[in-house]
Image (tube, rainbow, N blue to C red):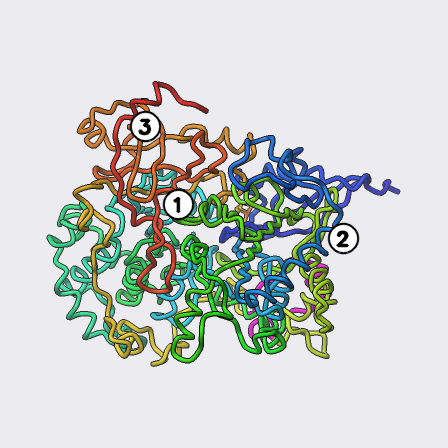
Amino acid sequence: MAAASPFRVVHTVCSHDCPDSCAVLVTVNEEGRAVKVAGDPDHSVTQGFLCGKVAKYLDRVYAPQRILYPLRRKAGVAKGPLVRGREHEAFERVSWDEALEAIATRLKQVVEEFGPESILPYSYAGTIGVLGYGSMDRRFFHRLGASQLDRTICAEAGGVAWNLVYGKKLGTPTEDFRLAKLIVAWGANIHGNNVHLWPMVEHARRNGGRLIVIDPYRTRTAALADWHIAIRPGTDGALALGMMHVILNEGLEDRAYIAAMTHGFEKLAERAREYTPERVAAWTGMTAGEVERLAREYATTRPAALRLNYGVQRTENGGTAVRAIAMLPALTGAWKYRGGGGVLSTSGAFKWDKAAVERPELALASPLGRLARTVNMSALGEALAVQGSGVRDQGSGNAEARAEAALPVKALFVYNSNPGAVAPNQNAVKRGLARTDLFTVVHELFFTDTTDYADYILPATTFLEHTDVQGAYGHYFVQMSKQAIEPPGEARPNVWLFGQLAQRMGFQEACFQDGPEELIRQALAIGEDGHSKNVGMEHITFEELERVGSIPLAFHREPEARPFQPYLEGPLPTPTGKIEFCSEALAAEGLDGVPAFVPNVESRWGKDAGRFPLEFLSRKADNYMNSTFANLEGHRRMEAKTSRRLEMHADDAAARGIADGDPVRIWNERGELKLTALVNGSVPAGVVAARMDWAKMDPDGATVNALTSERLTDLGAGATFYSTLVEVGKDKDQGLGIRE
Ligand code: SF4
């Protein structure tokens, strides 16, 4: 008889903000230490491999820099940037009891003095597990009466746009992209941050398919494309309308599909007539011939699949741009062909019982007795700039709305995010975080740009250290992520933290006692028969999910016998039941029912282009996840080529007397950044690019977000990171050379 293995393998799910939601098998030794992470070979999307970021995950889990105990800022230590590696000197270790008690006491004081809405939770997708992203925390803040956070920083404009056209976010299954004869990656760096689509792209290309990449920046994906179209930032909507013009002009649309499945075609056709290839060329920087060629190739190749990603919508006109692009497969009937169509996100397929998990009705038991005001996370600097003396002084009646908008934030509770690095208008955010009257708690794994401003830091867990359930926005599997190892030190997950805080606040509701299993059962709406009551999940039981780890949604269980084609037939969950080329809902609000291209205010066509003539792209790293991983040396080495570099076109560099390797200063009205020029052909003329990093890594404490604005997108009120104008000059003070 073979000896029992000293190792056990645990099914987990990568909870980082990535469409792939990989099934990760964690090997744990007898001592309870994780010794290996690997992609599940049996998962049809994960396919047995992990990206470069997470393949090295144990470097993160066992990093010596992890925060292991609750910390309190030492008396007399001012808030603000701390020297990297010496942050602990500003804090002292306290017990969880002391920390929770002190935080609860302070929150009660804030409620008493300023009202509960002066408490602001700030979180995003540092974990996208259902429990970790939003469960006990939501219950806690609803019951407290704290402000609600409008989580717009990443994907809201695109999500709203897609839903306006299709009703919900569904798309071509990742696995089916292999069947496409043309893949258009539009603002999608597949190789960098959706890497499990890449084998499908390669498969398609081996079968004669082509890859076209539309992106102002020469990403790794663009460098591997058959055709890279480097349009100017924020002109995607114009290009989509120009493609429509050509398609309609040449009769390449699918009239039968349009008649059966869409609404508002005539109005769209009328609009598209305005967008001649010549006009579109003038905006995008393409030639008219290229616009025509792209439209023809797209409309005449079957199956043609669009991989649209969220970069497109992070501009002022980004919502409309996504709306226009999303209409293309409906115009050509691409959805009729398996492997055709496209995807922005698959998240609309997962029907979690969110009300049961988040319990918004707890707000009725709060001191407010109603749902609290909403604060937009993409304008955090603005929110923190409101100083007022408090709610109680600010009147009522008609003035109430104005007073509500101007309520101060007196306590900030940050988890799953690092706004000190990722939020737009970094200098405004830093000014706000440095306020001496602001009480800030941060739940984190490492010392970050945000913990430098914390009154209390609480140690958080990685996905190996807690249990969760997860869907995806790039595939159609429900997965359970089981706790593989004990958390190091005294690190604790979100569910535990907010359950404990609820007790300290004296909240009596039984729901604050729920643990991960109860919450997962609630998210799945497990009924008396043991099965989920959620649409598309009825075949799922808690026990089966726990046993196998990963279960496809109902419509994806037999992908070969019954392939999923989301918009093959109606009705769709839009007001007309059809794909909406024209939105009567938008028109009723006095907005354009059909998309039109309006150049961004912060663009080469804007009023400030004289002073700030270059369009700035604040890029994401291929080997980080926004700001996550940026503190790990192995990950930094993988990004070394563009670390602290400003990528420039040769014409723009020459016009400023800048040579490759010169120190440069980049500035606008909001801030400045000092980097080293990299003249490498990665951006078109008039565009410069630099990578997001931590302020801590910069001698001046600046990130790319020192330059970005808090202006919001046209749909969804999201962040506009890629609508940023700057000027660049040689930095005479800096001396030559790269400082990292
Ligand atoms: S970051 Fe994305 S690709 Fe990498 S392991 Fe996680 S889910 Fe997979």
- Amino acid under disc 2: Asp
- Amino acid under disc 3: Leu
- Amino acid under disc 1: Asn
Measuring from the top left, give residue 267's x and y in whole percent: 19, 74
Gap between marks 3 and 1, in whole Å?
A: 21 Å
**CA neighbours of label 2 inside 10 A, class few (<14), some (14 to 19), many (20+):** few
Measuring from the top left, give residue 434's x and y in whole percent: 50, 46
In the drawing, what numbered circle is on residue 189?
Answer: 1
Gap between marks 1 and 2, in whole Å?
A: 45 Å
Q: Quadrant of the N terminus?
A: top right
Q: Residue at x 46, y 24 (%)?
A: 740
In the drawing, what numbered circle is on residue 721?
Answer: none
Q: Residue at x 60, y 74 (%)?
A: 367
Residue 146 is covered by the magenta coloring: no
Gap between marks 3 and 2, in whole Å?
A: 51 Å
Residue 185 visible to the viewer: no
Left or right for 554, reference 720: right
Of mark 3 and mark 2, the one earlier in the sequence is 2
Q: Who is closer to the viewer here, 84 or 473? A: 84
Q: Which residue is mark 3?
A: 678
